[in-house]
Image (tube, helix red, strand yellow):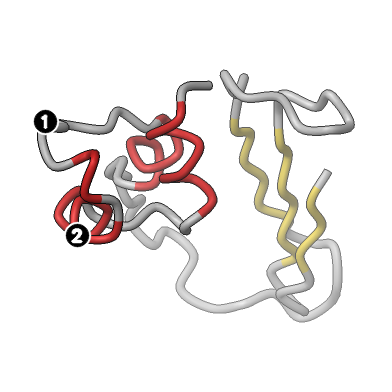
Amino acid sequence: MDFPSLLYAQLGHPSLVKIQQIVLNLSKLSNLSCESCYLGKESYNSFSCSVLQRTSSPFVLVYSDIWGPSLVTSNLRFQCLVIFIDDFSRCTYLF
């Protein structure tokens, strides 16, 4: 990882203008390509609400979603996420 990208990540992903104000040596930097910022700005399509009322007991209806594979691996080397949401309790499980 080069110095501008490392500094950018360590400072919490500030805007290019802010990082140029902090580090004067980077005043000629034209852009910072950051995968985390790019992924954070992705748009999502919403689904229509086909269930009008919640269920009357746990685990009758469970929603799930899968995300991945990630281009960035975690310390545990996981590349995908699976989330389960119980409609009755709204209890959420993330694996």
Q: Which mark is residue 91?
A: none
Q: Is residue 23 above or below residue 26?
A: below
Q: Quadrant of residue 27?
A: top left
Q: Secondary structure at mark 2?
A: helix
Q: Is residue 20 left or right of residue 37?
A: left
Which of the image's four quarters has the C terminus? top right
The residue at the far front in this view is 25
Residue behind mark 1:
30
User: What type is the residue that disc 2 sits on?
Assistant: Gln
Q: Earlier in the sequence, mark 2 or mark 1?
A: 2
Q: Position of residue 42 (x, y in %)?
A: 31, 40
Q: Position of residue 51 (x, y in %)?
A: 49, 65
Residue in view at x 77 percent, y 79 percent: 89
Q: Position of residue 72 (x, y in %)?
A: 62, 24
Q: Is residue 59 above or below residue 66?
A: below
Residue in view at x 80 percent, y 62 percent: 60
Q: Is residue 51 above or below residue 38?
A: below
Residue behind mark 2:
21
Q: Is residue 11 left or right of residue 61?
A: left
Q: Secondary structure at mark 1?
A: loop
Q: Residues within 10 Å of mark 1 (few under 14, many from 20)?
A: few
